Amino acid sequence: MTPRMDEKLLIERFDNRLRKDVPLANLTTAKVGGSARYFISAESAAQLAADVGYLWSENIPFLVLGSGSNILVSDAGIEAVVIHNKAKLIHFDENSATPSLYAESGAILITAARQAAMRGLTGLEWATTIPGTVGGAVYGNAGAHGASMQQNLLLADILHRTKGYLSLNTEQMGYSYRSSALKREPGGAIILSARLVVEKGDTERIKALLNEFAARRKQTQPPGPSMGSTFKNPAGDSAGRIIDSLGLKGTRVGGVQVSQMHANFFINDGSATARDYRDLILLVQGIVEEKTGTRLELEIEMIGDWKEQE
Ligand code: EPU
């Protein structure tokens, strides 16, 4: 069955939740990109599941948007239904034998990690510097400071397009560096919520770690609109180090520039387009491959319609 977008059907189903032609740039951290043809917000994991189940059943194309931190939305925008994931519930099971945190997938990872720290729970300090949602971090195996989501995940509750509701453990999530089985099968499943392991810890030590990580981030990662790390690190090396070593800091296409502070961050000066980002990505990727033989892989995901820009 070919995907279709029947506006009448969407209005019937979503009624006044449905919005049309909603600009997405301000919902992304890079602050570029066009509009969503259709846009709805999901306020709970149950609502998200119901919406996705419906769109799958009608074969209507959709995309779940979290906090927009790891994506590049095309200037042409997204000819689909964008579901803004605002399912943000977080609660703690700190007194059970295995203390854990439950979060709906739209919860902000930094908020969840800070709340754990404030309760004297350790293990998620690394996540206090990562912009994004819990769902995005579980999907992309986000990480920093030598740790990543795969060390914390107990179970990810997902809705699978053909298999229905499933709870997957770390092994079943098929984690690898900045990737997962779900990321390798785009559109196959969505994350509804996750349970993360934490441990009772020493409050002073937790605070010290938070301060150390925040300071390190401030020292090494630039402020300003960007997507965070643009490329994945090749095995045993750092994309930022390689780009820097080729003298590419400061390289500019239109309104986007390779950061002077960290060469894997591409900063929007306020006037950038998604096309500027795409062109700078291709330029840097090309030079790195030509000079070093290494093909840098994108960590970010390019979404929307890019065709007429080729
Ligand atoms: N370096 C340079 N020049 C640069 C940037 C880095 O020489 O312009 C060198 C640094 O001096 C250091 C090495 O490269 O020796 C590694 O740099 P850094 O410690 O900044 O770490 P990274 O590998 O660039 C990774 C993650 C970040 C995470 C940091 C801190 C990836 C792609 N990036 O960066 O994650 O915050 O470690 O743990 O894995 C993200 O994934 O979006 C992200 C920001």
Image: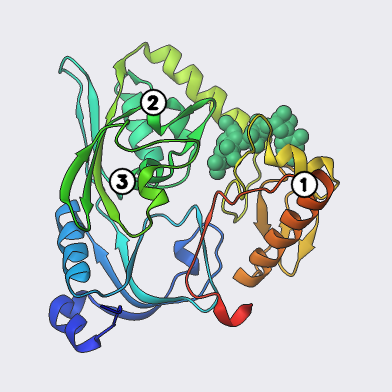
Is 240 situated above or below 34? above
Amino acid type at image mark 2:
Gln
Residue matched to label 3: 107
**Local SS, label 3:** loop
Number of other residues with Cα within 10 Å of mark 2, as a class: few under 14, some 14 to 19, many 20 or more = some
**Local SS, label 1:** loop
- Res 137 visible: yes
Residue matched to label 1: 260
Q: Where is residue 3? Give x, y as percent.
A: 30, 78
- Confirm or reject: label 1 Cβ below 8 Å from ligand 1: no
Is 183 situated above or below 22? above
Quadrant in which ligand 1 is drawn: top right
Earlier sequence position, callout 3 versus callout 2: 3
Name the mark on residue 151.
Answer: 2
Number of other residues with Cα within 10 Å of mark 1, as a class: few under 14, some 14 to 19, many 20 or more = some
Q: Is residue 287 left or right of residue 302?
A: right
Residue at the far bottom in the pictured view: 8
Q: Residue at 28% across / 53% down in the picture?
A: 190
- Confirm or reject: label 2 Cβ below 8 Å from ligand 1: no
Q: Where is residue 301? Give x, y as percent.
A: 51, 57
- Tell us which disc is closer to us: 2 or 1: 2
Amino acid type at image mark 3:
Ala
Mark 3 and mark 1: Cα distance apart in space: 32 Å
Earlier sequence position, callout 2 versus callout 1: 2
Q: Where is residue 12? Give x, y as percent.
A: 13, 83
Q: Is residue 98 left or right of residue 134?
A: left
Q: Is residue 119 left or right of residue 296?
A: left
- Tell us which disc is closer to us: 3 or 2: 2
